[in-house]
Amino acid sequence: MAPSTATDLFQCHINTLGCFQITPKFAGDFATHQLKLDNIQLRLSRLGEIGIDTIDNADNDANEVERVLGDIGDRIERAKRETSTPENEIGRDVGSNFPSDLKKIRNQFMKSLDGRKFQASKDTKIERRDFEKEELLDNFIKNMCELMDDLERTIPEAKREVLLKLSDEECKGLSKSNLEELKRILQGCDPWLEKSVDKQLEAKDKGNVIKQSRNQGTTIGVQYGDNKGITNGDNNRQRMAFN
């Protein structure tokens, strides 16, 4: 039976987006592209936390929400024709092809998805689809990001801060190197997560800078992590001891 309401369409898209993956024979950057694919589902799931009914009943034209969800469905159907059925899906773990640092980012994405109200149904059998051609995959990601932009614009202004809060949670606990990689990978794909990454990188940089000038005496403290950005300045007679 075809989905009949905005909520039904939303759940259907969350389910179906989880079917797309990249063939191991993919010629491009496998991990980077798979993370971009995963991010589309993650980005859509944030709207479920706000409540698709809330969005549908917003002051905006209610038909706009269903129109965008319908456009997303059309693009997903087209993507199914542009992809192929995996040769051997049994026992395949997409994350096994990831470098260890990028696997941490993907695990964080999956953890966030598992905690959302709208999740891929465990009871619904979904046929996996493999992207093989980089050009088709890049075009799908571009189109879906544009449609996510359209859908997020229907959210009432007062609710939009929830998107940033959810994005903060999605990159919580990632190392500075992870955050820098995530910023590079998702550039132009997810404005909310990009803001969260920038905020956390700024916080990490601020926490690592110590400036001292024209001091005499001893600085004693407990240091956790690396010492970075420390300068004693000119004419300094200072001895620092960190345990």
Image (cartoon, grey):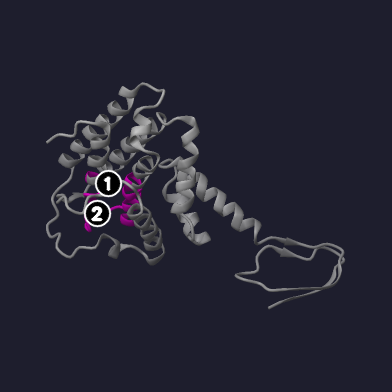
Q: Secondary structure at mark 2?
A: loop
Residue 112 in the image: x percent, y percent? 38, 54
Tag shown at residue 134: 1
* Residue situated in front as seen by the camera: 171 or 136: 171
Q: How many marks?
A: 2
Residue sticking out furthest to the top:
61
Looking at the picture, how far across and down is residue 101, in whole percent? Answer: 41, 64
Q: Nearer the viewer, residue 49 or 205?
A: 49
- Seen from the viewer's position, the closer of residues 132 and 230 is 230
What residue appears at the point 50 percent right and 62 percent down from the top-left corner?
A: 175
Q: Are marks 2 and 1 in contact (CB under 8 Å)?
A: yes
Residue 107 found in image quarter: bottom left
Q: Position of residue 152 (x, y in %)?
A: 40, 33
Q: Name above or below for residue 34 compared with residue 216.
A: above
Secondary structure under the numbered disc 1 in the rendered image: helix
Rendered residue at 85%/68% (across/down)? 236
Amino acid at pointer 1: Glu
Query: Quadrant where the N terminus lies?
Result: top left
Q: Which numbered disc flags the more N-terminal residue, 2 or 1?
A: 2
The residue that label 2 is drawn on is 26
Please rate how many residues cluster around mark 1, counting C-alpha atoms within 10 Å: few if below 14, some from 14 to 19, many from 20. some
Q: Is residue 158 above or below residue 21?
A: above
Asked whether residue 133 appears in the rendered view, the answer is: yes
Q: Residues within 10 Å of mark 2 (few under 14, many from 20)?
A: some
Q: Left or right of 24: which side holds 110?
A: right
Q: Is residue 32 visible?
A: no
Q: Position of residue 161 (x, y in %)?
A: 50, 39
Q: Which residue shows up at 72% across the image and 62% down it?
A: 210
Q: In the rendered structure, which amino acid carries the disc numbered 2? A: Phe
Q: Which mark is residue 179?
A: none
Q: Which residues are magenta?
A: 16-41
Estimate the spatial distance between the alpha carbons at disc 2 and disc 1, rounded to whole Å. 7 Å
